[in-house]
Image (spheres, grey):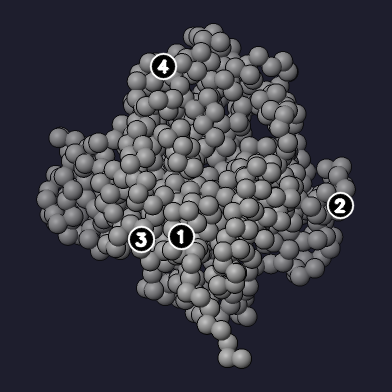
Amino acid sequence: MTVRIFVPRDAAALALGAEKVAKAITQEIAARGLDAKVVRTGSRGMFWLEPLVEVETAEGRVAYGPVKAGDVPDLLASGLLQGGTHELSLGPTEEISFLKEQTRLTFARCGIIDPLSIEDYRKYRGFAGLEKAIAMAPADIVRQVTDSGLRGRGGAGFPTGIKWKTVMDAAGPQKYIVCNADEGDSATFADRMIMEGDPFVLIEGMAIAGIATGATKGYIYTRSEYPHAIATMTEAIEIARAAGILGSSVMGSAHAFDLEVRSGAGAYVCGEETSLLNSLEGKRGIVRAKPPLPALKGFLGRPTVVNNVISLASVPVIMDQGAEHYKNFGMGRSRGTIPIQIAGNVKHGGLYEVAFGLTLGEIVDRIGGGTATGRPVKAVQVGGPLGAYFPRALFDTPFDYEAFAAKDGLIGHAGITVFDDTADMLKQARFAMEFCAIESCGKCTPCRIGSTRGVETADKIAQGIEPEKNKALLADLCNTMKFGSLCALGGFTPYPVMSAMNHFPEDFSPAPMVEAAE
Amino acid sequence: MNMRISAGEFTERSLQIIRDLKHLEGPMLPILHAIQAEFGYVPDEVKPIIASELNLSRAEVHGVVTFYHEFRDHPAGRHVLKLCRAEACQSMGSDRIADRVRQLLGIDFHQTTLDGAVTLEPVYCLGLCACAPAAMLDDEVYGRVDEHCLGEIVAEVRR
């Protein structure tokens, strides 16, 4: 039987040389006349081991990594095809503790299947949720999603089922499902991994959303910085259309649903849902005032569900396994699993899907293994550029929407950036303001002007110019931005700034300026 | 117009792109992406054509083009090198890498080398945050960018 060797085609694996490795294996197989073939997959999400090569054996998959193209001849000589041992051996993939301890519901197939094989997708319970949804009344689908406790994984944490119900109940000849795949937060890559590693799960989730709400058209709005995701997603949609999953009759049902991928153009603010809708309509990505809610007046003024990739990709498993199954994971009002993305200066960076409730310390120290540089962890930023910096003193905070809010932070899209003790928190606070200034859509004054004033004020503190007065001014500015901005960009930029100032005051008290000789 | 085609041909190619896409709901961004793919940037001369085809004012089209970082108003170099400047990459020393790139290429961000080989652009996240610092040369991605990797990238663009 032809032995299957798995090499990821995920962008992060490619960035670490997976393409060269796949080519080297293909060449060596041919040169040696071996009965084997290379299958390209998504990533398992263990990026310190990428490129991770897996081989299918009678005992399951066996992993090797990180593999360089130059290692390939030696690997084959060591009996790669039989799962032979080599210094790069990692043993059975599923036994690697980083993977074994996860609860993969949304990412169940990612890294395992060929992302563009509809057969592979079906083999791992693909479309089982959609089949069940087709047999149900729309209101029952919405109830099941509501009962699961699923909340928006983009960051806001709004209950997905309630949003769907609003759209279901809204009248209108044309409704839309818009997938927010504008994953611009630093430290986040879960959306990208799904689109590159298991695109059919997003298609399935969106089709279910369409059936539940009466929407027949969907858009996936993603980033021009994600060319690989765009290519895979576009191809998957064509395959799904040819297979009768999308189109005028979804899987032979009376429901119509079709999809299109749209690419943004490098504007971070378009990850905000109303700005995204304007951009999708072909306008400047300016934030809209709410109300009206997008659920009632969204894309082209019509009822629209705007959900994050991970929210939509979690729907198939909820429909397939039931609301109870999903809801049983998690803590408090944060139900189900969350794909935590561990990034930055960390030893074991990657994607870790787990039930809500792990403490920040467990994630950073035990799972992430501390810093990549081996120096002490100074701070972790949770939730992207708009998330707070947490010091070690707050590492007992459980990963839960409400627990983070109580500590003046946010989970956001669940990205964590680890910094070692060389980080300068005043510089990070300044960057938060600078980023807001670069990316502000310009509609509201606190964000547009406040961010620039924030950069100037941070600079004055750094230069030792009236530091106490300027720190008070910065705090006051943050207060205005937090409560006066129209959207989360200006409204949440104060989180990284204030947390840096409150938790790391020593970085905001630089040595007094040496007076120039008079 | 900084292109080696006649005004007539330019208009014809622009119209072709616009008419192929104008049936879409919200056709503006797909059109602008296609224009930039065709000409390497979004020339000023295309704005009245788009405006007329989509029944918008030229000011509206100009407003959209200038809102998005991705759309250029002049051609880029033969290659575009994007260096991630966001937090995860910062935590792994991307500021140092950025300084080194500027030194190696002799240009700052948003500039193109005199020989037209490469344009250097900042990018705020490539989604390669667990293998930082990250860069993208045209559509090719690079993770854990270090001195050696930079050498390869620079050699590639200089070729």
Q: Earlier in the sequence, mark 1 or mark 3?
A: 3
Q: Is residue A462 above or below residue A178?
A: below
Between A205 and A289, the one lying in front of the other is: A289
Same-chain status of marks 4 and 3: yes
Judged from the image, the secondary structure of the residue bearing numbered disc 2 is: helix
Q: Is disc 1 in contact with disc 4, using a CB cutoff of under 8 Å? A: no
For the point 33% across and 41% down, which residue is it?
A396
Is A85 on the left or on the right of B141, as rendered?
Answer: left
- CA distance for labels 1 and 4: 45 Å
Residue that carries the numbered disc 1 in the rendered image: A505
Classify 10 Å Cα crowding around label 3: few (below 14), some (14-19), many (20 and above): many
Query: Which disc number belongs to residue A420?
Result: 3
Residue that carries the numbered disc 2 in the rendered image: B58
Classify 10 Å Cα crowding around label 1: few (below 14), some (14-19), many (20 and above): few
Q: Is disc 3 in contact with disc 2, using a CB cutoff of under 8 Å? A: no
Amino acid type at mark 4: Ala
